[in-house]
Image (spheres, grey):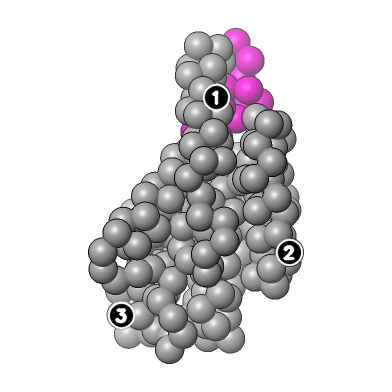
Amino acid sequence: MRLLYQTHSPFARKALVFALEAGLGERIEVIHHETSPTLRNEAVYAENPLGKVPVLLRPGLPPLFDSDIICAYLDTLHERDPLIPAHGEARWHVLRLQAVAQGLADSGIKVRWETVRRPEALRYEALREGYTQKLLESYDWLERELDVDSPVHLGHIAVATALGWLEFRELPDFRAGRPRLSAWFDGFARRASMQATPLSGETQD
């Protein structure tokens, strides 16, 4: 399999960290592609009509895109304990954490547009503040709700890769007043899967 990837995408990193945690790293060739809303990458558009990474290319099968779907697929390919529980409240807990992590990354991207990415004359401060509040509320929720002592699952991976990206981009700090979340993230960031997938680079438009 080949994974179309970007070294500064929280979503691509989530898919690759998941693959490594599932023991599938040796089965995946990682291919870097630069994409942004203002930079059309024809190779990525050929596989994903949204023009975004990650995209998982499977021999003889249609490509899969969106990190959630890629992770769900990868969880069917290994013999370890599943990283996405199949049934019951454990499943909904993990998927709920993944939804919060997705929202963190999406909100951070929007804050970044209104802070540094959009031409200054076009930035909308009220929109930036609204998305900043979503970040802060989600940080507080994770401080209360994250299951910091349970075995690793998709929710952990999604949260860690989102928080890592927010810190990488110097977006609103998740650490201030949140010792439980901060300690958990620092421990997760030392895992081999995270160490093997460092964030780097700037968005190219």
Residue at the image position 52 percent from the left and 74 percent from the top: 19
Label 1 packing within 10 angstroms: few (<14), some (14-19), many (20+): many
Tell me where residue 85 appears, x and y as whole percent.
35, 69
The mark that comes first in sequence, 3 or 2, is 3
Residue at the image position 43 percent from the left and 50 percent from the top: 97
Distance from disc 3 to disc 2, alpha carbons, whole Å, reads 35 Å
Left or right relative to 144: residue 85: left
Label 3 packing within 10 angstroms: few (<14), some (14-19), many (20+): few
Residue at the image position 32 percent from the left and 62 percent from the top: 91
Q: In this rendering, is residue 107 above or below 3? A: above
Label 2 packing within 10 angstroms: few (<14), some (14-19), many (20+): few
Give the labeled residue for mark 3.
61
Q: Callout 2, which amino acid? A: Arg
Q: Main secondary structure of the magenta part?
A: helix
State the mark number for residue 122.
none
Tell me where residue 171 appears, x and y as whole percent.
66, 32
Mark 1 vs mark 3: give the one in front: 1
Give the labeled residue for mark 1.
132
Quick one: which residue is furthest to the bottom in this view? 79
Residue 16, by quadrant, is: bottom right
Residue at the image position 41 percent from the left and 76 percent from the top: 82
Q: In this rendering, is residue 177 above or below 166? A: above
The residue closer to the viewer here, 30 or 99, is: 99
- Could you tell me if the residues under marks 1 and 3 are in contact, i.e. CB atoms within 8 Å? no
The mark that comes first in sequence, 1 or 3, is 3
Give the labeled residue for mark 2.
190
Q: Which range of residues does the magenta coloring cover?
A: 105-122
The residue closer to the viewer here, 180 or 205, is: 180
Residue 121 within the segment the image draws in magenta: yes
Q: Callout 1, which amino acid? A: Thr
Distance from disc 1 to disc 3, alpha carbons, whole Å, reads 40 Å
